[in-house]
Structure formats: structure tokens, C-alpha cells
Image (cartoon, rainbow, N blue to C red):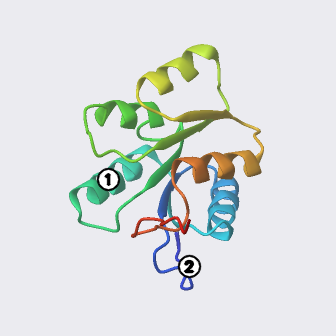
Amino acid sequence: MSYRNPDIQKGATVLLAEDNDELRELLAFCFYQAGYNVTSCNNGISLLERLQAGIEGDSTPIELVVTDIRMPGLTGLEVLESYFDQPELPPIICITAFGDRQTHEQALRLRAKAVFDKPFDIDLLVQSAKQLCPPVKNNHATRSLT
């Protein structure tokens, strides 16, 4: 499933990986409403494939990843681990229903920028995403008029 915002041609693309259909649909819609283009998948293997395609330039570049930690196929942490040495990896936010301290530490060690425990405040998740990757790309420098 993908949400493309036709009014925002320069919108950043979020890759959303979540195995719960209802939560994935809700999050995709919330990110879309916040101005992002969204592509999503429901398991770790699809996440790995789409992330690789984005890194290699075979598909739309991915500017932000939001991934569940426990999913079928591969976990979000296993995907993070496989890309640990990739310098061009986009920022990653992890979400989990199993958020013990060890899981948080492992995700952050593997370069996740944030970890949210379910249930979480969707507004806070979107705000965190906006801080890591604004929804609209700005291709030119901002100038001060003083």
C-alpha cells in the first residue's frame, strides 16, 4: 500500500513496516495527513527488500523508516542489524509492544533514532518523525533578509 500526496511533489517518503493491518493503515494515513508520501509493508523481509531497493536507487528514495520490532520473517532489529554499516541508511524509528529496557538499548545501539512503546501517542510519533525528517523536502538554502 502506498499513499502519494499529489499536492506535495517534493514530499519525503516514509517506509512503514507493521504487521498489524489496522495499525499500519492508521499510521500510514496519519503520516500522509502530516504531508509525507508513505509506502508500507507487513513483514521484515519486505522491509529489507524495500530498504535495499531505496538505498540502491531502484525505487523511490526512502527518507525515513518507521518499523515494528517484532514482525514475521525478520524482526525490525534484524533488519537494522543487517544495515548497521550502511552510511546512507535513513533515520529509523522503532515501535514495539515488547519495549523492555534491553530492547530499547539494542535498537538504539543499532542506530534507531527513537523507540516508541505501544500503545503510543501517534501525534508524538509524527512529531518525532518531523524532527528527524521534515515532510517536505527543501532543495534550496533558507536566506535571512536582515
Residue 19 seen in the figure: no
> How many numbered circles are shown?
2
Image quadrant occupied by the C terminus: bottom right
Q: Which label is found at residue 9? A: none
Quarter of the image holding residue 87?
Answer: top left
Q: Is 53 above or below relative to 4?
A: above
Earlier-in-chain disc, 1 versus 2:
2
Kindly give the residue lying farthest to the top in the view shown. 102
Q: Nearer the viewer, residue 62 or 100?
A: 62
Relative side of 84 to 19, left or right: left
Relative side of 127 to 11, left or right: right
Q: Nearer the viewer, residue 8 or 37?
A: 8
Q: Which residue is mark 2?
A: 5
Q: Is 125 above or below relative to 95?
A: below
* Label 2 neighbour load within 10 Å: few <14, some 14-19, many 20+: some
Do tag 1 and tag 2 residues touch (Cβ < 8 Å)? no
Give the CA distance from mark 1 to mark 2: 23 Å
Picture coordinates of residue 16 (x, y %)? 52, 54
Instruction: Name the residue at 69% across, 62% down.
Output: 30
Element type where label 2 sits in the image: loop
> What's the amino acid at mark 1?
Glu
Picture coordinates of residue 37 (x, y %)? 52, 69
Instruction: Name the residue at 40% across, 69% down.
Output: 140
> What's the amino acid at mark 2?
Asn
Quarter of the image holding residue 94?
Answer: top right
Q: Which residue is mark 1?
A: 49
Picture coordinates of residue 137 (x, y %)? 46, 67
